[in-house]
Amino acid sequence: MKQFIIRSVLVLITMSTALNAATKVNGKWLDTSLSFEERSWALVDEMTLQEKVGQMMNTAPAIERLNIPSYDWWNEALHGVARSGYATVFPQAIGMAATFDTDLMYKTADVISTEARAKYHQRMRERGYTSIYYGLTYWSPNINIFRDPRWGRGQETYGEDPYLTGQMGMQFVKGLQGSDPKYFKVVATPKHYAVHNGPEPERHRFNAIASKRDLYETYLPAFEDLIVKAKAYSIMGAYNRVDGESASASYMLLEDILRNKWGFEGYVVSDCGAIGDIWQHHKIAATAEEAAALGARRGCDLNCGVTYRALIRAIDEGIIDEAEIDLNIYRLILAKMKLGMFDPDDMVAYSKIPYSANDTDSNSKVSLEMARESVVLLKNANQTLPLDKNKIKTIAVVGPNADNIDSLVGNYNGTPSNPITVLKGIQSALGDNVNVIYLPGSELAQGFIDTENPGITAPEYTNDKGEKGLTAQYFNNRELNGTPVLTRTEDHIDYRWDEASPTEKELAQGIITPEHTVNKDNFSIRWTGKLAGPADPDSKLVMCSDDGCRVFIDGQKVLEDWTSHATTYYEINHNFEPGKQYDLKIEYFEGQAQARVAFGWKAASDSPDGMMAKANAAAEKADVIVVVGGLTAKLEGEEMLVNYPGFKGGDRTDISLPQPQLELLKAMQKTGKPVVFVMLTGSAIACPWAQDNIPAILCGWYPGQNGGQAIADIIFGDYNPAGRLPVTFYRSTDQLGEFDDYNMDGKTYRYFKGKPLYAFGYGLSYSTFKYSDLKVNKKKARPGDTIKLSFKVTNTSSRSGDEVVQLYISDLDSELAMPVKQLRKFQRLHLKAGETKKVNMTIKPIDDMRYYEPRLESYTVEPGEFELQIGSASDNIKLKYTIQIKN
């Protein structure tokens, strides 16, 4: 309710004082001479019980008597403003972590929050949109620890290390929330607090059991950093139980730790449906009323979902008092106050950000910078890379991710207006002087049907005027009713609008006028004309759609699925004669969220064997081969209905490179040509065969809208790579323990004692670097002392480049079970050829050498010897120093 009230008031004030007079809304909460706290309580006092409860759910209804519009608290900005039309799309979170660049992370988050404000003011205030994905409360970042590479949502995190996660996450929060002393730019919401990282299909019923030491040394530190140091104003609970309590209604997490120990003053939101899980799946409560009361009483202020509707009955039954939920409401209203939602625009500097600040060239350059810095060079035998453009006549670009937009954007993504795939990046880099041959080469995974990229060819179309193309009519409703808002001729049907309107780009470019604008959601299209039979009679006619579709051939309905659903692949059975003309009508509707529609021929030769044969033929003609594979968020992600070999429910059961891609790599290697393997992925892939046999390997993550350009820049030497792995790349699934075991023993570089394929912090460069002159100001220290150290790094090559220096600390003689080593400082340096820089670092034993002592319920430092390890990776230590710690 508070949220709605705030938004209403915002709109009210923005429009004019006359509007206030007309509606006679002159509440004390509008008095800007009072504090936000006073104004918030004044609004609480004004609200009825029904109004209060309505505002405690993410989709909060309007309060008409107060002239407050509806508001939805749900918005996403994991790596760019998501699900809200065109926006700048940055590399997936795991890729941003691979930069080890906190300054660039802040810069990126600042761009994201600028675009967030631009969209909010244009859409909410100017157009009155108050639905999901239009607000200023963003449910990002995801700072769960990527404990096990099988977790499908690990791509959303900053990796497996608590310190790196905290450092990157703090800058992201600061960039989102802004630096204004009075108002937030947007509200950041770290998630999922706190012990949450798979298995994904079990999250609604799973009980995560962690020791106190693992809780405080692994699962909580990043959350503490973001709440205490970065002052994140919101936090999201998790679905699962933690030590028997729902994470979204836990006394230990929400009251004892978050509010009492960390002093958190913001608001808590449940994960979506998590309050319902309390009674439906966890069986902690017997009824919705009991679950709602438990959540509110424990300090979960906002329910993503509808279970808090039961609070009214819970109050009637005496399970909870109305006075108890007043504090929940107060916190929500106060957050909106701090966003400026009750104040005139001339008081809120962020309200002046224009819509033109969204999806700009300058923002795109930041995305490109982030993509370049994120790429990790894993192998470069015999200086295979960079490739010399002047020595290449023909290059074969093969692999299922070579021209795949999904492999750029990951999940929780926005819609890029000009995505550059690896194929496009290579084509652009080489120009017209080099022959670039592209073929998919293999499936992404065995049996996988890529509904977003079905590999179709546009048929030959003719409209009723005898012109090339189909007549397309767009309607601003789902049922093709009334007069089309837009009619035009289109020569293909292969559109991926995602969360954008079909006319958003054309409207921004001035190609169409506002009266021809098509809705972002709830629209429909009818295409009519003639279709020519295929040249190859064995071709199949394919349709892909999200949501409903119908196809008519010569007046006969050959396909109908007029329902809302995810992108679905259909093959149309009809006997076509080559060259013959057929009457064609296609109807499509988009409901909400993703919009995708494609129609065309799929050649019989695009079977797995056919794709391999084509790739081999192309490779024989090439001077060099670039294989682009890995994964996409269609295989790894959140609670997905996928079940292919190695994949289940969004998680992986096998971390190996999918078999079809491994076979493609082996086939390309057999040609004897130089092979470069580019992995686009959100998680660690076990590929020991590639490491042993392929000369050059790059990990590009899901690199964002400019990922193809960034990777081409590195392949051809226009950028010198320096990304580092924020996760361990294991050699095989056999090196992993039980997925559902939250005990950290044996997991991540901090506790793993085996030999990985690539270690945490690993990454190569085209330059070489030397470390020297380590100096430490103490040989002995006490827990509260400050230890200062310095060393020099020299670029010993003839090429400028970046080096990521990393400081690890290892407890050498502990009687307790301790991590093998822990990252405690890092810095990304740019060094010109031959340049030397001095690096200064400061550590404190009480912060950097501590462990959690459950008996004392506090952190402490064990006396003894600790080794300071400085290098370019966790397994590539250049300098060491042993220091004695005494009490």
Image (tube, rainbow, N blue to C red):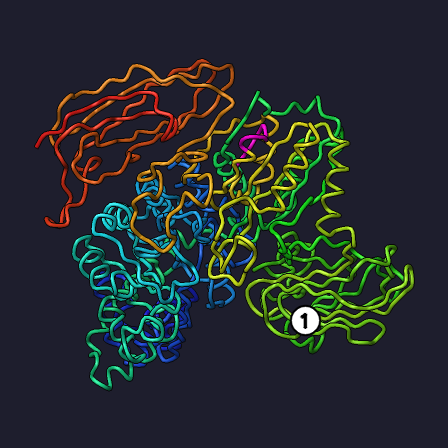
Q: Position of residue 724 (x, y in %)?
A: 43, 33
Q: Is residue 69 positioned above or below 119 on the image?
A: below
* Image quadrant where residue 499 sits: bottom right
Q: Which residues are magenta?
A: 691-699
Quadrant of the drawing holding the C terminus:
top left
Element marked by disc 1 = strand
Badge 1 local density, few (<14 within 10 Å), some, or many (20+)? many
Residue at 44% of width from left, 62% of height from top? 201
- Residue 697 highlighted magenta (yes or no): yes
Say whether residue 263 is visible. Answer: yes
- Identify the residue under disc 1: 475
Q: Observer-nearest residue: 140 or 135?
A: 140
Q: Is residue 468 positioned above or below 863 on the image?
A: below
* 788 left or right, relative to 627: left
Q: Position of residue 614 (x, y in %)?
A: 76, 42
- Residue 138 highlighted magenta (yes or no): no
Residue at 46% of width from left, 33% of height from top? 723
Q: Is residue 358 positioned above or below 648 on the image?
A: above
Q: Position of residue 503 (x, y in %)?
A: 65, 59
* 755 left or right, relative to 411: left
Residue at 69% of width from left, 45% of height from top? 440
* Image quadrant where residue 256 sits: bottom left
| Tag 1: amino acid | Phe
